[in-house]
Image (spheres, coloured by chain):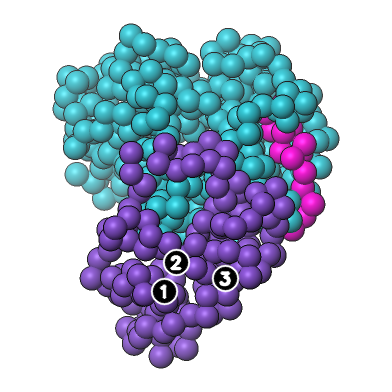
Chain colours: A cyan, B purple
Amino acid sequence: MTHGRTLDLEDVVIVGAGETDLGVVVDRGPMELGAESVQKAVKDAGLNLNQIDGLITCNSLVHPVMYHAEATAEYLGIEPRHCMAVGTGGGTTFTAIRYAAAAIQTGLAHTVVVAMADSMRSFMTRERAMVVQASSGHPLYEQPYGPSVPAYYALIARAHMAQYGTTEEQFAEAMVSSRAWASMNPTAQYRELVSVGDVMASKPIADPLKMLDCSIVSDGGAAIVLTSRERAADMPNKPISLLGYGEGHSYEHISQSKNLTQSAAVESGRLAYQEAGLTPADIDIAQLYDCFSPALLIQLEDLGFCAKGEGGHFLQSGATRPGGSLPVNTHGGMLSHCHPGNPGAMFGVTEAIAQFRGLAGPRQQANPRHILLHAQGGIMSSHATLILSQEYA
Amino acid sequence: MDKILPIPSPVSQPYFDGCKQGELLLQHCSACDRSQFYPRVMCSHCGGDSLTWRRAGGEGVVASFTVVRRPVSKAYDAPYVIALIDLPEGVRMMAQLAGVDVDTVSVGLSVKAQFEAWSDEVTLPVFYPA
């Protein structure tokens, strides 16, 4: 039921966040983790579960259910007036957050939770996980040839090497940076520092990518609570605004890509910067989608943090590491922190919230004003960019 | 364990029938005079539906490639090369690359399609150095 008035995007805010145990979690499955993340996020917002009237969830790859958001609502014992399950994670993680905001803007719901969780590490065999992930390939024209997910991203890495002279050592810097951050995060699954040499010496997976160019496999869940700025006035946390949002979609299957080295992150970034009235120079922290090292490198270029073709040098310069000019994935990202499958990008959101609130411990950045979040799905196919801030014009 | 096999639809069946006969068939749009891959019910360039099947020459150039060291399942013998091939007909397709030293493949390599049985029913194009 709408009230005849549509709120502006700036009237919608994030007021709560919650994370489950992350990494290897054997005592809870996907639904339990999802429910726990909601419980924690709602408590963090100073609310009761029955004050949640909108629920958006991401289906589990491990235990898929027909109507996931509805089943989660039932599990929580709530009867929201708006439920929606999204099929996949990646860029749609931020699409779901934008939908939550739209639901609040239009009066479809007043207080919406976005929750995502899965248990790829402990509730699925490695073999099954590989097959499930590789099923993102085209079933007729790609999958029969036997490409793995790392192989899809290796095609992008190789094209970037051929076009711009990017080196394997430069790709390796992605994990070096990731671990430097993860070493300061007690919730990160892998916290040991690594060198370029360690990455280069790790097991070959799909040339030029090695084991340490690839994200990890984890269990875990995270949820956030959104509501109107008006309602947030009575809540304990300082609200966080959605300053800008954009999407870009140029294909789904990698063999349909017209440009292997430049992605639709250019378009999603342009739209997000435009809506926020900002440029890349205004971004204090970037939480990017580091499923594989070339994905991170190309996002740095396409989102305007360095020139096209310069991603390798940018990573090598240490810019993304602690003390660098653009802290990237301050939680450790999907390369080291947590990557349960589809929910991976949610931990960039909860980390951004922790950074705004000054709760990020040794990785805390001094008063971040603008944090850019980017996620992509498919094989650098579908992109969404979100810019958050605690400031309110 | 079996290799992953395509399940053709009525629209894509001619492509797979062509492979069985050693022909690489592409849909060509007579409205915009362009080819497309993969097969569709409409032209993805102009939205039209004047599609006819044309035989492609089978030549191509490697746009990118990867040597898969860890196979996606036991049905695939690693190492094997997955490549994106650009055809002069203006389409890009994924295929395996065979008949090459996996350590000397390069972007820009000229290749030519041959046809290989993937199962009793299904034949697929595999590219070899031209």
Tags 2 and 1 in contact by the CB under 8 Å rule? yes
Earlier in the chain: of badge 3 and badge 1, it is 1
**Residue that appears at 55% across and 47% down:** B80
Q: Quadrant of the C terminus of chain A?
A: top right
Where residue B1 appears, x then y in whole percent? 33, 39
Task: Identify the residue under disc 2.
Answer: B115
Q: Which region shows up in magenta?
A: A163-177
Compared across the picture, whether B108 is left or right of B90 comes to right
User: Disc 1 marks which amino acid?
Assistant: Gly
Task: Identify the residue under disc 3.
Answer: B112
A278 in relation to A291, above or below:
below
Question: Residue A69 or B59: which is nearer the viewer?
Answer: B59
Task: Identify the residue under disc 1.
Answer: B22
Query: Real-space Cα distance between discs 2 and 1?
Result: 6 Å
Q: Indicate the secondary structure of the residue bearing disc 3.
A: strand
Q: Quadrant of the N terminus of chain A?
A: top left
Residues flagged by tags 2 and 3 on a common chain: yes
